[in-house]
Amino acid sequence: MAIKYIFTVLGDLAGNALKYVRCKSDEKQLEFSDCSLQKTSIKKANVQSIPDKTDTIITFSLEEIDDGNWHSTSSNTSRITVTDAGDYQVSAQVGMISKKDSQYEIRILKSGTKIYNALFISAKDGLCISLGLPARAITLAANDYLEIQVYHNSNEATNVENGTETFFSVVKIS
């Protein structure tokens, strides 16, 4: 019988009141408990224009929580830089308005190198699309940094939306 742990974020529908919880699961029961792990969750305060056919790093100016002190709102605002080696859970989402027959991509970079991505092809103009990367565990060294990069080919600049549509979260899990 294997015991599995899942770390997740709870919040209200407006994206407020973040709380991290640990879910412990075995074959007989599911148990929830508070999680006091180091974590950072950041989001955008305003829109960011993304040029056509250009890999663009997303900047973040609002910290929902940063008890690991991994994000700065004054320098390198695109980065979450971890201070300790270990395993981390990473998730991200970027909100954009789509153009028909265009490709949209979101990537997570580790110290400048892509580690994973998601692709979306739009079939309709004007959709508010959420490019999401589900939670994923990765191993990081001390001072590694993570960034979100986006790309699109809609033949004109488009905006990354602010507020709850665009966020970036990292939790140290071991």
Image: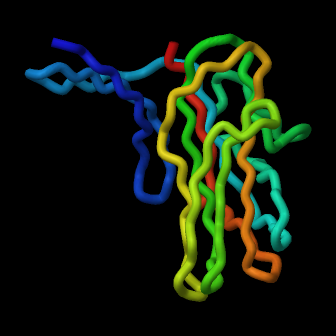
Please name whichever residue, 95 or 41, is drawn nearer the observer in this view of the structure: 95
Location of residue 18 in the rendering, given as x and y in whole percent from the top left corner:
49, 40
Q: Report the residue at 73% width, 32% height from top.
A: 110
Please name whichever residue, 101 or 28, is drawn nearer the observer in this view of the structure: 101
**Is 76 situated left or right of 105 in this image?**
right
Q: Is residue 4 above or below residue 94?
A: above
Please name whichever residue, 118 or 133, is drawn nearer the observer in this view of the structure: 118
Q: Is residue 52 above or below residue 141?
A: below
Q: Report the residue at 22% width, 23% height from top.
A: 25
Q: Is residue 101 above or below residue 9?
A: below
Q: Report the residue at 58% width, 60% height from top.
A: 119
**Which image quarter is the N terminus in?**
top left
Location of residue 73 in the rendering, given as x and y in whole percent from the top left corner:
82, 40
User: Residue 96 is drawn in which quadrant?
Assistant: bottom right
Location of residue 97 in the rendering, given as x and y in whole percent from the top left corner:
63, 77
Q: Residue furthest left?
A: 28
Q: How is the image coloured?
A: rainbow
Q: Report the residue at 71% width, 47% height from top.
A: 148
User: Residue 103 is drawn in which quadrant?
Assistant: bottom right
Q: Residue furthest right?
A: 75
Location of residue 151 in the rendering, given as x and y in whole percent from the top left corner:
74, 62
Please name whichever residue, 118 or 31, is drawn nearer the observer in this view of the structure: 118
Q: How many marks?
A: 0
